[in-house]
Image (tube, rainbow, N blue to C red):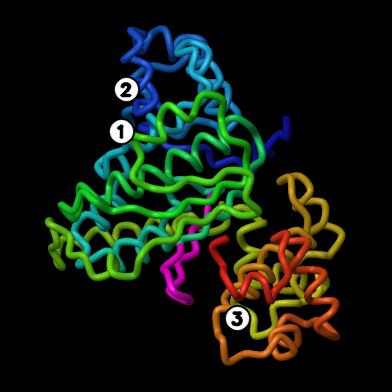
Amino acid sequence: MKMISTRQDQGIPGVYGLLLLDIVSRWGYSDETLFAPFHLSSEQLADPNYRIPTEVANEMLKYALHLSEESTLGYHIGTQMRISIHGFIGYAIMTAHDITDAVALASRFIQLRLPFLQLHFSTFGPKATLQFQCDINIEPLRSEIVLGLSLGILTMAKALTGVEDLSAEIDLDFPEPQGFDKYRDKISSQIRFNQPHLIASFDKKYLGLKMVNADPIASQVAINQCETELSALGERRRLAMRVRDILTNAEQHYLSIETVAEHLCMSDRTLKRQLAAEGTSFSTIVDEVRYRHATSLLSRTDYSLEHIADQLGYSDVANFSRAFKRWSGRSPSNWRKDPYL
């Protein structure tokens, strides 16, 4: 199991532990049964400022899986997810104008709730997409959160718009949990496991759906609160996120590690060491940024492969094609023909 640096670990909000309790209670288990082994209580977790250390959250989820004798709880997490548990972010989304604004807000502020997760919203191509970037590798926490959030976004979208027939295509990069078939008939969306990426794609017609509780004043108040929290997060943000931001926002997405280290006022050796402590590396982050940028560029049919290779810092199309196939399992040309295979 890959550990997370305690200094960098910001944990997850305690209220998500209460969501887990809500789920296992259907099997007859109480808060004392679920939380006592971790010296926690419902009162503690209800405190809006309390965060469960990531490793503790992982062990708690393992314990919940053991108690329920389920192979996955992600389905239940997703179908029971309510916007109210997400604090000011949830309130900002609930009172947003439409789905487009709501998804943009989720992408902008998700790190306040789950610091190890990023959402990348795109309207390039024939469908709108929401790509997940998860910076932790500990299991089962990673898989259950990603599956739960993927389904939870749909659950909440249906409740917030009043439209019940919403659906999406969801690609997940981990194996299908044993026994998941029993839930497929209950899910309106297509879910594919063992895919090269974490991405949900949906019809662009949903983007204009209005929120039933739209309130521009209330939404702005909530957004201001989220901005304040985001500002306070400051230096507590994980280094990997800061590196990713520098690479993403740079005119050239292939900055050297020396250049990025200089931006962060540290040596490249220190940068390598601190990224390793977070379970990642500079080359891994560069690949992630290049892959996201590559898929966006490939969605532009007016861009040649030569132009895209040059934009990404590759000397020729052959080198770019090899890298893209390593990232996605497909050639750039094949991906461009159908991004959703």
Nearest the eye: 44 or 66: 66
Q: Position of residue 141 (x, y in %)?
A: 56, 33
Q: Position of residue 9 (x, y in %)?
A: 60, 40
Q: Which residue is mark 3?
A: 297
N-term-proximal mark, 1 vs 2: 2
* Structural crowding at the residue carrying mark 1, measured as other residues with C-alpha within 10 Å and reported as few (<14), some (14–19) or many (≥20): some
N-term-proximal mark, 1 vs 3: 1
Tag shown at residue 41? none
N-term-proximal mark, 2 vs 3: 2
Q: Which residue is mark 2?
A: 22
Q: Is the Cβ of the residue at disc 2 closer than 8 Å to that at disc 3? A: no
Q: What span is colored magenta in the figure? A: 117-129
> Hey, what amino acid is under mark 3?
Leu
Residue drawn at point x = 64 percent, y = 85 percent = 251
**The magenta stretch spans residue 120:** yes
Mark 1–mark 3 Cα distance, whole angstroms, equals 37 Å
* Structural crowding at the residue carrying mark 2, measured as other residues with C-alpha within 10 Å and reported as few (<14), some (14–19) or many (≥20): some
**The magenta stretch spans residue 245:** no
Question: Closer to us: mark 2 or mark 3?
Answer: 3
**Majority secondary structure in the magenta region:** strand
| Residue 236 left/right relative to 232 | right
Mark 1–mark 2 Cα distance, whole angstroms, equals 9 Å
Q: Is the Cβ of the residue at disc 1 closer than 8 Å to that at disc 2? A: yes
Q: Quadrant of the N terminus?
A: top right
* Structural crowding at the residue carrying mark 3, measured as other residues with C-alpha within 10 Å and reported as few (<14), some (14–19) or many (≥20): many
Q: Which residue is mark 1?
A: 80
> Hey, what amino acid is under mark 1?
Gln
286 to 11, vertically: above or below: below
> Hey, what amino acid is under mark 2?
Asp
